[in-house]
Amino acid sequence: MVVLFAKKRDGKLEEVGRTEVILNNLNPTWIQKITIAYQFEMVQPLVFQIYDVDTSYHNKPVKSLKLEDQDFLGEASCVLSEIVTRHNRTLTIQLQNRNGHGILRKLGALTVHAEETIASRTAVEITLRCSQLANKDLFSLSDPFLRISRMVEGGGYVPICKTEVVNNNLNPVWRPLCLSMQQFGSKENPLVIECFDFNSSGNHVLIGKLQKSVADLETLHREKNGANFVIQTSHGHEKVLKGQLFVDLFLEKQQYSFLDYVSSGFDLNFMVAVDFTASNGNPRNPDSLHYIDPSGRLNSYQQAIMEVGQVIQFYDSDRRFPAWGFGGKTPAGTISHCFNLNGSASFEVEGVEGIMAAYASALHNVSLSGPTLFGPVINTAAQIAGWGHHRYARNQRCLGEGI
């Protein structure tokens, strides 16, 4: 049996879930899945503990088993982001004893596979157009747009999307819309499509409306038919209008999530730029944002570097991070708004620890100056991002006073 724990910041383990017990097997494959919430913005350490469950407990629910009554076989630790960034979201980890040793004793290995659980990946791309809309403007043609709403429990409707405004046109064609299943619920769920004449005052005039499901829109596209708008008269009756809605494109497709990209080799690269302007205060003064506390307490810049860097580093395959400073006077005596934080010819450092070391070194070699100019750093980062690494996303962090 595998028991999954989440390690909290204080080091305590919080049980997340358990697998089923597999009898008499040294190479088990468990079926029971354990669900855990993925949080990109946090480092989520996990501990997997393996137990040999005594035969006398085999008919009892696994949640009722006391772990201290079972034989501990080993444990494996990792961070959740290490799993989701691997190819096929699969990670193999060597088992250890609780004291962190045991690999040489061949305690075995645990292979963990992660799956993203979402209600549906289905999305629909549709292109809508209208013909022969009623004109609601006096000296020009209507400026139509569509608003689509979904029926909710209780019979009401909530808007889920709207098109752009097409000016002076009674036969508009709108840009394609992409609707996810989370938005429309199901293909049979009734949707209300309203066509309005746009007014800058916000008092938009209803041209007409109709009710169709996503399945109905698919049928309109397949049969190349139009659906007539209706409008309620002063007597409470619905009047069928000449204006019609057509579906020029209907395409079902699968939506890809962030985890799909990172497990396919998409990297995030953390870029950091630190503010060395004089407004931060003298680094020797405890009130300075750059003050290095002898007790080891991190200053504001160090905290920001650690909190962001420790999360991003697991999404970067080489963990080499560009690091700059700006607004400081370099050892050469010039004020620079984009200098390499490590003082060398290369702007990259190794890991979050490399950023921290480069920052500490720069505080001894760079004098605070000014003014605060972000442009050179942002331009440099943009240039690097445009070097043709199309599979890489860049996460830039400018660390400045008051930011």
Image: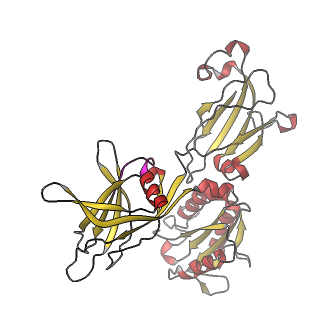
- Residue 297 x, y percent position in the rendering: 57, 55
Q: Residue at x 65, y 57 (%)?
A: 262
Tell me: 174 left or right of 278: left
Image quadrant of residue 383?
Answer: bottom right
Q: Residue at x 83, y 38 (%)?
A: 103
User: For this rendering, which residue is in front, 328 or 185?
Assistant: 185
Image quadrant of residue 332?
Answer: bottom right
- Residue 391 x, y percent position in the rendering: 68, 67
* Range drawn in magenta: 183-192
Q: Residue at x 59, y 56 (%)?
A: 256
**How many numbered discs sit on the rendered protein?**
0
Tell me: 43 left or right of 206: right
Q: Can residue 196 be seen here?
A: yes
Residue found at the very far left of the displayed protein: 235
Picture layout, residue 44 above or below residue 99 = below
Picture layout, residue 369 above or below residue 113 = below
- Residue 311 x, y percent position in the rendering: 61, 55
**The N terminus sits in image quarter:** top right
Image quadrant of residue 203?
Answer: bottom left
Residue 186 magenta-highlighted: yes
